[in-house]
Image (tube, rainbow, N blue to C red):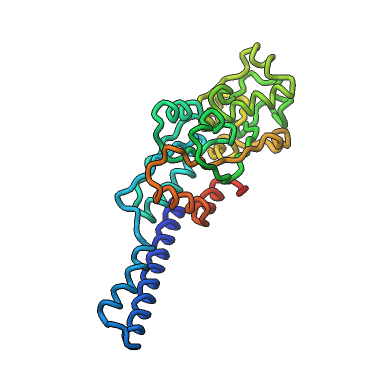
Amino acid sequence: MKSQTNRVKALTRKKFAAVVVAAACALTMALAGCSAGEPSSQGGDKAAEPAAEEQASLEGKELNIYCGAGMTDPFQEIADAFEAETGCAMNVTFANAAQIQTQITTTEEGDFFVAGSADELKPVTDYVEQQTDLVKHIPVLAVPADNPKNITGLADLANCERVLVGDPESTPIGKIAKNALTKQGLWDSMMAGNVLTTTTTAPQISTALANNEGDAGIVWKENVTDDGAIIVETTDLDAFVKTIPAAQLTCAADADAVAAFNEFLQSDTAWDIWADYGYERV
Protein backbone atom coordinates (compact mmCIF):
# COMPACT_ATOMS: atom_id res chain seq x y z
CA MET A 1 0.00 0.00 0.00
CA LYS A 2 2.92 2.29 0.75
CA SER A 3 4.23 1.89 -2.81
CA GLN A 4 0.79 2.68 -4.19
CA THR A 5 0.62 5.86 -2.08
CA ASN A 6 4.05 6.88 -3.40
CA ARG A 7 2.84 6.30 -6.93
CA VAL A 8 -0.14 8.60 -6.35
CA LYS A 9 2.16 11.29 -4.94
CA ALA A 10 4.54 10.90 -7.88
CA LEU A 11 1.75 11.22 -10.39
CA THR A 12 0.47 14.30 -8.59
CA ARG A 13 3.96 15.89 -8.80
CA LYS A 14 4.12 15.09 -12.52
CA LYS A 15 0.76 16.74 -13.12
CA PHE A 16 1.86 19.79 -11.13
CA ALA A 17 5.02 19.99 -13.24
CA ALA A 18 2.88 19.79 -16.38
CA VAL A 19 0.83 22.75 -15.15
CA VAL A 20 4.01 24.76 -14.58
CA VAL A 21 5.29 23.94 -18.08
CA ALA A 22 1.96 24.87 -19.65
CA ALA A 23 1.90 28.20 -17.82
CA ALA A 24 5.48 28.92 -18.91
CA CYS A 25 4.59 28.23 -22.55
CA ALA A 26 1.58 30.53 -22.34
CA LEU A 27 3.73 33.30 -20.89
CA THR A 28 6.34 32.86 -23.63
CA MET A 29 3.68 33.20 -26.34
CA ALA A 30 2.28 36.29 -24.64
CA LEU A 31 5.70 37.93 -24.55
CA ALA A 32 6.24 37.05 -28.22
CA GLY A 33 2.97 38.83 -29.04
CA CYS A 34 4.17 41.92 -27.18
CA SER A 35 7.43 42.07 -29.14
CA ALA A 36 5.44 41.87 -32.39
CA GLY A 37 3.53 45.05 -31.56
CA GLU A 38 0.73 43.69 -29.35
CA PRO A 39 -0.28 45.84 -26.34
CA SER A 40 2.18 44.76 -23.66
CA SER A 41 0.62 44.14 -20.21
CA GLN A 42 -3.03 43.70 -21.28
CA GLY A 43 -2.21 41.31 -24.12
CA GLY A 44 -0.04 39.19 -21.82
CA ASP A 45 -2.77 38.87 -19.20
CA LYS A 46 -5.38 37.79 -21.74
CA ALA A 47 -3.10 35.14 -23.23
CA ALA A 48 -2.35 33.64 -19.83
CA GLU A 49 -5.96 33.44 -18.58
CA PRO A 50 -7.19 30.45 -20.69
CA ALA A 51 -4.34 28.22 -19.47
CA ALA A 52 -5.23 29.02 -15.85
CA GLU A 53 -8.92 28.25 -16.49
CA GLU A 54 -8.18 24.90 -18.16
CA GLN A 55 -6.25 23.75 -15.09
CA ALA A 56 -8.87 24.95 -12.58
CA SER A 57 -9.01 22.67 -9.51
CA LEU A 58 -12.12 21.20 -7.92
CA GLU A 59 -11.38 22.62 -4.49
CA GLY A 60 -14.59 23.17 -2.58
CA LYS A 61 -16.51 20.60 -4.64
CA GLU A 62 -17.48 17.09 -3.56
CA LEU A 63 -18.74 13.80 -4.95
CA ASN A 64 -20.94 11.31 -3.12
CA ILE A 65 -20.38 7.78 -4.37
CA TYR A 66 -21.88 4.38 -3.56
CA CYS A 67 -19.63 1.36 -4.07
CA GLY A 68 -20.02 -2.38 -3.52
CA ALA A 69 -18.28 -3.48 -0.31
CA GLY A 70 -16.25 -6.11 -2.15
CA MET A 71 -14.32 -3.34 -3.93
CA THR A 72 -13.49 -1.29 -0.83
CA ASP A 73 -9.68 -1.40 -1.04
CA PRO A 74 -9.12 -0.57 -4.73
CA PHE A 75 -11.91 1.96 -5.02
CA GLN A 76 -10.93 3.83 -1.87
CA GLU A 77 -7.45 4.16 -3.31
CA ILE A 78 -8.87 5.44 -6.61
CA ALA A 79 -11.03 7.96 -4.74
CA ASP A 80 -8.04 9.11 -2.68
CA ALA A 81 -5.94 9.55 -5.83
CA PHE A 82 -8.65 11.67 -7.48
CA GLU A 83 -9.01 13.82 -4.36
CA ALA A 84 -5.24 14.32 -4.15
CA GLU A 85 -5.09 15.36 -7.80
CA THR A 86 -8.10 17.67 -7.95
CA GLY A 87 -8.96 18.73 -4.39
CA CYS A 88 -12.50 17.38 -4.80
CA ALA A 89 -13.79 15.85 -1.54
CA MET A 90 -14.71 12.18 -2.09
CA ASN A 91 -17.43 10.75 0.14
CA VAL A 92 -17.69 7.01 -0.54
CA THR A 93 -20.29 4.71 1.01
CA PHE A 94 -19.39 1.00 0.88
CA ALA A 95 -22.25 -1.46 1.34
CA ASN A 96 -23.93 -4.43 -0.30
CA ALA A 97 -26.02 -3.90 -3.41
CA ALA A 98 -29.42 -4.08 -1.71
CA GLN A 99 -28.44 -1.47 0.87
CA ILE A 100 -27.16 0.89 -1.83
CA GLN A 101 -30.23 0.43 -4.01
CA THR A 102 -32.47 1.30 -1.06
CA GLN A 103 -30.34 4.34 -0.24
CA ILE A 104 -30.57 5.67 -3.80
CA THR A 105 -34.31 5.19 -4.17
CA THR A 106 -35.09 6.54 -0.68
CA THR A 107 -32.88 9.63 -0.64
CA GLU A 108 -32.64 10.28 -4.40
CA GLU A 109 -29.15 11.61 -3.72
CA GLY A 110 -25.69 10.64 -4.90
CA ASP A 111 -23.43 11.06 -7.92
CA PHE A 112 -22.18 7.55 -8.80
CA PHE A 113 -22.96 3.91 -8.10
CA VAL A 114 -20.01 1.56 -8.70
CA ALA A 115 -21.72 -1.82 -8.69
CA GLY A 116 -20.47 -5.38 -8.47
CA SER A 117 -22.19 -6.14 -11.78
CA ALA A 118 -24.53 -4.51 -14.28
CA ASP A 119 -27.38 -6.61 -12.84
CA GLU A 120 -27.21 -4.54 -9.66
CA LEU A 121 -28.15 -1.41 -11.60
CA LYS A 122 -31.50 -2.81 -12.76
CA PRO A 123 -33.45 -1.97 -9.56
CA VAL A 124 -32.29 1.65 -9.86
CA THR A 125 -32.37 1.99 -13.64
CA ASP A 126 -34.56 5.11 -13.42
CA TYR A 127 -31.72 6.82 -11.54
CA VAL A 128 -28.94 5.92 -13.98
CA GLU A 129 -27.95 8.70 -16.37
CA GLN A 130 -25.20 6.69 -18.05
CA GLN A 131 -22.82 3.86 -17.23
CA THR A 132 -19.26 2.90 -18.15
CA ASP A 133 -17.78 -0.60 -17.94
CA LEU A 134 -14.55 -0.62 -15.92
CA VAL A 135 -13.05 -4.00 -15.05
CA LYS A 136 -13.94 -7.68 -14.88
CA HIS A 137 -15.36 -9.04 -11.64
CA ILE A 138 -14.15 -12.63 -11.39
CA PRO A 139 -15.76 -15.15 -8.99
CA VAL A 140 -13.53 -17.93 -7.65
CA LEU A 141 -13.73 -21.00 -5.45
CA ALA A 142 -11.62 -20.43 -2.34
CA VAL A 143 -10.58 -22.69 0.53
CA PRO A 144 -8.45 -22.47 3.69
CA ALA A 145 -4.74 -22.63 2.90
CA ASP A 146 -4.46 -26.31 3.90
CA ASN A 147 -7.60 -27.24 1.88
CA PRO A 148 -8.82 -29.76 4.50
CA LYS A 149 -11.54 -31.24 2.26
CA ASN A 150 -9.26 -31.51 -0.79
CA ILE A 151 -11.61 -29.35 -2.89
CA THR A 152 -10.79 -29.31 -6.62
CA GLY A 153 -14.08 -28.02 -8.06
CA LEU A 154 -17.70 -27.22 -7.30
CA ALA A 155 -18.75 -30.88 -7.31
CA ASP A 156 -16.54 -31.50 -4.26
CA LEU A 157 -18.63 -29.08 -2.21
CA ALA A 158 -21.12 -31.94 -1.75
CA ASN A 159 -18.64 -33.40 0.74
CA CYS A 160 -18.31 -30.22 2.82
CA GLU A 161 -19.75 -29.47 6.23
CA ARG A 162 -19.71 -25.67 5.87
CA VAL A 163 -19.58 -23.62 2.66
CA LEU A 164 -19.61 -19.83 2.73
CA VAL A 165 -21.56 -17.84 0.14
CA GLY A 166 -22.92 -14.33 -0.14
CA ASP A 167 -26.57 -13.63 0.55
CA PRO A 168 -28.25 -14.29 -2.83
CA GLU A 169 -30.94 -11.70 -2.04
CA SER A 170 -28.56 -8.81 -1.46
CA THR A 171 -25.14 -9.50 -2.99
CA PRO A 172 -24.04 -10.22 -6.58
CA ILE A 173 -21.53 -12.85 -5.41
CA GLY A 174 -24.36 -14.60 -3.57
CA LYS A 175 -26.50 -14.67 -6.70
CA ILE A 176 -23.60 -16.18 -8.62
CA ALA A 177 -23.11 -18.86 -5.94
CA LYS A 178 -26.78 -19.81 -6.02
CA ASN A 179 -26.81 -19.94 -9.82
CA ALA A 180 -23.60 -21.98 -10.06
CA LEU A 181 -24.54 -24.47 -7.33
CA THR A 182 -28.07 -24.84 -8.72
CA LYS A 183 -26.61 -25.81 -12.10
CA GLN A 184 -24.47 -28.37 -10.28
CA GLY A 185 -27.61 -29.74 -8.61
CA LEU A 186 -26.25 -28.87 -5.17
CA TRP A 187 -27.97 -25.71 -3.93
CA ASP A 188 -31.21 -27.22 -2.59
CA SER A 189 -29.54 -30.16 -0.86
CA MET A 190 -26.84 -27.98 0.70
CA MET A 191 -29.46 -25.52 1.94
CA ALA A 192 -31.57 -28.36 3.35
CA GLY A 193 -28.53 -29.84 5.08
CA ASN A 194 -27.51 -26.49 6.61
CA VAL A 195 -24.18 -26.69 4.80
CA LEU A 196 -24.43 -23.15 3.39
CA THR A 197 -23.62 -20.12 5.52
CA THR A 198 -24.44 -16.73 3.98
CA THR A 199 -22.70 -13.40 4.53
CA THR A 200 -23.77 -9.85 3.78
CA THR A 201 -20.52 -8.88 1.99
CA ALA A 202 -17.94 -10.79 -0.05
CA PRO A 203 -14.83 -9.91 2.03
CA GLN A 204 -16.36 -11.68 5.04
CA ILE A 205 -16.12 -14.99 3.16
CA SER A 206 -12.36 -14.82 2.61
CA THR A 207 -11.76 -13.71 6.20
CA ALA A 208 -13.76 -16.63 7.56
CA LEU A 209 -11.89 -19.13 5.37
CA ALA A 210 -8.54 -17.71 6.47
CA ASN A 211 -9.65 -18.33 10.06
CA ASN A 212 -10.66 -21.93 9.23
CA GLU A 213 -14.32 -21.11 9.79
CA GLY A 214 -15.44 -23.00 6.70
CA ASP A 215 -14.39 -25.68 4.22
CA ALA A 216 -14.81 -23.58 1.08
CA GLY A 217 -16.50 -20.48 -0.30
CA ILE A 218 -17.43 -18.70 -3.51
CA VAL A 219 -16.01 -15.20 -3.49
CA TRP A 220 -14.55 -12.50 -5.73
CA LYS A 221 -10.95 -13.11 -6.81
CA GLU A 222 -9.67 -9.82 -5.38
CA ASN A 223 -11.02 -10.61 -1.92
CA VAL A 224 -8.71 -13.61 -1.44
CA THR A 225 -5.79 -11.59 -0.11
CA ASP A 226 -5.14 -13.24 3.26
CA ASP A 227 -2.37 -15.86 3.40
CA GLY A 228 -4.79 -18.14 5.24
CA ALA A 229 -6.99 -18.65 2.16
CA ILE A 230 -6.18 -19.76 -1.39
CA ILE A 231 -7.94 -19.95 -4.75
CA VAL A 232 -8.78 -23.35 -6.23
CA GLU A 233 -7.67 -23.60 -9.86
CA THR A 234 -10.88 -24.57 -11.65
CA THR A 235 -12.88 -23.40 -14.65
CA ASP A 236 -16.22 -24.11 -12.96
CA LEU A 237 -16.98 -20.41 -12.45
CA ASP A 238 -15.64 -19.01 -15.74
CA ALA A 239 -19.16 -18.63 -17.14
CA PHE A 240 -20.11 -16.34 -14.26
CA VAL A 241 -17.54 -13.56 -14.74
CA LYS A 242 -19.21 -10.14 -14.46
CA THR A 243 -18.29 -6.56 -15.35
CA ILE A 244 -18.03 -3.72 -12.84
CA PRO A 245 -19.83 -0.60 -14.12
CA ALA A 246 -19.58 2.97 -12.90
CA ALA A 247 -23.07 4.45 -13.16
CA GLN A 248 -23.52 8.22 -13.17
CA LEU A 249 -26.77 8.98 -11.37
CA THR A 250 -29.50 11.36 -12.52
CA CYS A 251 -29.35 13.05 -9.10
CA ALA A 252 -25.67 14.00 -9.58
CA ALA A 253 -25.22 17.52 -8.22
CA ASP A 254 -22.05 18.96 -9.77
CA ALA A 255 -21.53 18.58 -13.51
CA ASP A 256 -17.87 19.66 -13.45
CA ALA A 257 -16.87 17.22 -10.72
CA VAL A 258 -18.85 14.39 -12.33
CA ALA A 259 -17.25 14.96 -15.74
CA ALA A 260 -13.77 15.10 -14.21
CA PHE A 261 -14.26 11.85 -12.29
CA ASN A 262 -15.70 10.09 -15.33
CA GLU A 263 -12.51 11.03 -17.17
CA PHE A 264 -10.31 9.98 -14.26
CA LEU A 265 -11.88 6.51 -14.18
CA GLN A 266 -10.49 5.98 -17.70
CA SER A 267 -6.98 7.16 -16.78
CA ASP A 268 -3.85 5.04 -16.40
CA THR A 269 -3.77 5.98 -12.71
CA ALA A 270 -7.14 4.30 -12.12
CA TRP A 271 -6.34 1.29 -14.33
CA ASP A 272 -3.05 0.70 -12.53
CA ILE A 273 -4.78 0.67 -9.15
CA TRP A 274 -7.36 -1.87 -10.33
CA ALA A 275 -4.54 -4.02 -11.73
CA ASP A 276 -2.64 -3.92 -8.43
CA TYR A 277 -5.61 -5.66 -6.82
CA GLY A 278 -5.89 -8.36 -9.48
CA TYR A 279 -8.66 -6.89 -11.62
CA GLU A 280 -8.58 -7.26 -15.40
CA ARG A 281 -9.53 -4.42 -17.71
CA VAL A 282 -12.67 -4.97 -19.79
Q: Is residue 231 above or below residue 57?
A: above
Q: In the image as oriented, which residue stretches furthest toward the left? A: 41
Q: Residue at x 51, y 55 (%)?
A: 267
* Viewer-proximal residue among 93 and 235: 93
* Callout count: 0
Quarter of the view holding residue 195: top right
Q: Is residue 161 above or below residue 119?
A: above
Q: Is residue 109 above or below residue 188?
A: below
Q: Residue at x 36, y 84 (%)?
A: 32
Q: Percent from the top left, x then y, of residue 170?
A: 53, 24
Q: Percent from the top left, x then y, of residue 30?
A: 34, 79
Quarter of the view holding residue 141: top right
Quarter of the view holding residue 133: top right
Q: Is residue 177 above or below residue 93?
A: above
Q: Is residue 227 in view?
A: no
Q: Residue at x 44, y 34 (%)?
A: 94
* Viewer-proximal residue among 227 and 206: 206
Q: Quick check: 219 left or right of 53?
A: right
Q: In the image as oriented, which residue stretches furthest toward the bottom? A: 36
* Viewer-proximal residue among 69 and 21: 21
Q: Residue at x 25, y 79 (%)?
A: 41
Q: Is residue 37 in view?
A: yes
Q: Percent from the top left, x then y, of residue 160?
A: 67, 21
